[in-house]
Image (cartoon, rainbow, N blue to C red):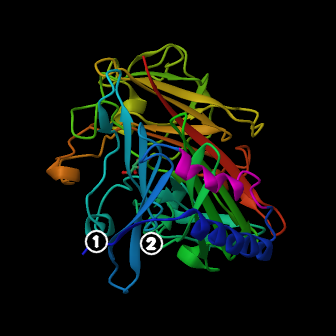
Amino acid sequence: MKQRCILHPWVLSGLMVTTSFFLMGLGWAQNNDTTMAASKITSERKANAMDIIKDSFGITSEGEAITLYTLSPSSEFKVAITNYGGIIVSIITPDRDGTMTDIVLGFDDLESYIGKHPYFGAVVGRYGNRIANGKFTLDNKEYTLAQNNSPNHLHGGVHGFDKAVWQAEPLRRADAVGLKLTHTSPDGNEGYPGTLQCEVIYWVTQSNTLEISYKAVTDAPTHVNLTNHSYFNLAGHDSRTILDHEMTLYAEYFLPIDDTSIPTGLLQPVANTPMDFRKSRMIGDRIEDEDEQLLYGIGYDHTFVIDPENKKELRQAAQVYEPIHGRVMDVWTTEPGVQFYSGNFLDSTNIGKGGMVYKHRYGFCLETQHFPDTPNHTDFPSTVLRPGEIYQTRTEYRFSTK
Ligand code: GLA
């Protein structure tokens, strides 16, 4: 039986007070946006504006109850997130005629998310993408991780953050509803050193933006590289391939990979290659070119360098436009790179929401992050986190139409 309740402002206020104590314990600064006064807004808006709806999403085999939170800041934007893996289960936005459609791939039930799937919508950690041969040396000590993408380590290992049960706290501010997820990964978890305390905050705003901010602290030197692995299809998750989506990537360089998808270490100019998306063009334009990089990736599965200087300022990484329905997605991030993955390994084995069969290239990912295999590349922007430091990044997916 589904349990459904709308969280009332006073419950939320209580949760926020509890949260601030929790954060003080961790030594983190409270997010100033999380004002209690903002919670009064609910009653003044139309029926489903500023709602946070809580549904039971099932129970894990360890007996943990999992919740699905549907955040709707307005009647024109709705994002559902579960505390299992921090997974974004749906993003519903209008097309240019106002028709609301779910534009991310995923499942209707928890069991499917617990089962085998390619990280649909999940928080990826401790380390997004690959670490060569599942090994790195930090402060003269070698660490061994799972080689779960033989011969490499992928997306945090066998039981990564995509499979963790996160603690969840609903949030409100004047223009948005949100969800704070926290998770502690113990020292040695999946082979990584240090106890890592992580926080992911999703804000779903009235201007149709999904903001994601990540924070982490550690008690011993370690590597961290968190991202979100949503698969988008701006025509609808239940439509067709993404090859006719038009995309701009604000990148002069990409990271060429070897035949196991590990970066060679070079930053290669995109000019005169199929990687050149500096001017908007269809994803499918050159995806079948006889190009060594496209052959290694079985399509696009490469890091594009958004900020070679790693200034950590919010800047635009990408714009994607779907011409038939008119949806536009702008991606902004403080990260130096974005992994553009054209859904090359989708192969009809995942039966998604409403029985939809997700075929080859029916979704694409723009995973904002530091570069893959940085622990083995001293000249890449560092992913080392030491005690006393705060890992902090932010990404925004802004939706509109034209
Ligand atoms: C990332 C990787 C891909 C693939 C997918 C998940 O985008 O770069 O190679 O592993 O995740 O299937």
Residue marked by disc 2: 159
Tell me if residue 387 comes above or below residue 378 in the rendering. Answer: below
Task: Name the spot of residue 100 as percent of width and height, x first.
Answer: 31, 35
Quadrant that contains the N terminus: bottom left
Q: Magenta residues, as a range?
A: 30-44
* Amino acid type of the residue tagged 2 in the rendering: His
Percent across and percent down for residue 290 are 32, 23
State the image quarter where residue 305 is shown.
Answer: top right
Sort mark 1 into few (<14), some (14-19) or many (20+) by Cα contacts within 10 Å.
few
Q: Look at the numbered disc 2 and give the secondary structure of its residue.
A: loop
Residue 38 on the magenta segment: yes
The image shows residue 231 at horizontal and vertical percentages of 37, 43
Q: Is residue 57 left or right of residue 238?
A: right
Q: Name which residue lies at 58% across and 30% down.
A: 317
The residue beneath circle 1 is 2
**Circle 2 crowding by C-alpha within 10 Å: few under 14, some 14–19, many from 20:** few
